[in-house]
Image (tube, helix red, strand yellow):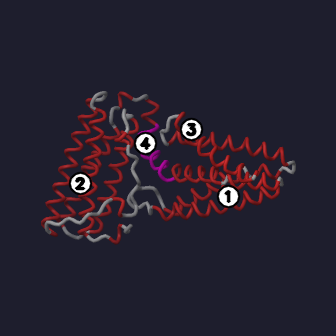
Amino acid sequence: MKKFNELTEREVLALAISLEEEDERVYSDFAEGLRQDYPATAAMFEGMREEESSHRRKLIDLYRQKFGEHIPLIRRQDVRGFVQRPALWLNRPLRIDAVRKEASAMEVETRRFYERARERTQDAGTRQLLDDLINEERQHEERALELDREKLPANVKEDEERAQRRLFVLQIVQPGLAGLMDGSVSTLAPVFAAALATRSSSDAFLVGCAASAGAGISMGFAEALSDDGSLTGRGHPWVRGVVCGAMTAVGGIGHTLPFLIKDFRAALWAAGAVVLGELGVITWVRHRYMDSPWVSAALQVGLGGALVFITGVLIGSS
């Protein structure tokens, strides 16, 4: 993956064309998926699709004037800083609240990309076109925020449509949740395997501390190096890395602390109770901030935790 600052003006324009084409197709799928139940909203997305198509044609015309006919293939996944988009358009039926938030996030990301691109060019014609696109993307963002307001309860509109909440989710909740899930689940196997193999609370405690610290450091670096946040507004990468790493360590330490209890059997039962509490918290966070249904979130988290726990028990008992 290339850094945005390493792209040439030719590559920036080629990437812009690719982004507009992708957004156009996403809006087309949103319109198709909402047409039956929300015809007015589908018509709005169809209009946004046509505008994205217009943006793409303008960018292609500018590219031809400056660089000729061949447009190199460069996509969002080839450049650092873009968030991986969930494929909401593949799900049926589409959920109007999830579509609204995704459309708003798409426009914020595209607008930030054009703002960064404008800073990189000295050509007057290119800067003018990018300024026009920035203004149009801002209008799209506002329209996405206003999407189908009358179909949403007042408390949902107040909570979910605020940009600050989106930033909080991107910068804190997502890396924190990823860390908490990894720490709570991945350390189950070594902690309980060590506990059952040694029948010693102190040995299990030491293994849990080592596994939690190691997982926290690993996840922290992985999150910090995955995305520099320059185009997405996800915040400074090292802040996200610290949040992710700290929550990973917390997730592992949670079911390690009960092994400070000298009585091994009591420590084991206490650790099991803490694990259930951790999985419950993760399920709640996924439902509250990531829009996962209760049943789906509980099954996903519970299944993963159960498999890792069983692995640790089997290894420790062998």
How far apart are the alpha carbons under marks 4 and 2?
Answer: 23 Å
As drawn, the label of residue 299 is 3
Percent coordinates x, y for residue 232 in the rendering:
40, 56
| Residues rendered magenta in the picture | 159-171
Indicate the amino acid at tag 1.
Answer: Ser
Residue indicated by mark 4: 162
Principal SS element in the magenta part?
helix
Percent coordinates x, y for residue 95 in the rendering:
39, 34
1 or 4: tag closer to the N-terminus: 4
Indicate the amino acid at tag 3.
Answer: Leu
Does 130 appear above or below 143? below
How far apart are the alpha carbons under marks 2 and 1?
Answer: 47 Å
Give the class, few, some or many, for how many residues have Cα within 10 Å of label 1's Cα (few <14, many ≥20).
Answer: many
SS class of the residue under badge 2?
helix
SS class of the residue under badge 3?
helix
Q: Nearer the viewer, residue 233 or 197?
A: 197
Q: Quadrant of residue 83?
A: bottom left
Indicate the amino acid at tag 4.
Answer: Arg
How far apart are the alpha carbons under marks 1 and 4?
Answer: 35 Å
Residue indicated by mark 1: 212
Is residue 295 left or right of 205 when viewed as pictured?
Answer: left
How far apart are the alpha carbons under marks 4 and 3?
Answer: 30 Å
How far apart are the alpha carbons under marks 3 and 1?
Answer: 24 Å
How far apart are the alpha carbons under marks 2 and 3?
Answer: 43 Å
4 or 3: tag closer to the N-terminus: 4
Does 161 appear above or below 66? above
Does 202 appear above or below 298? below
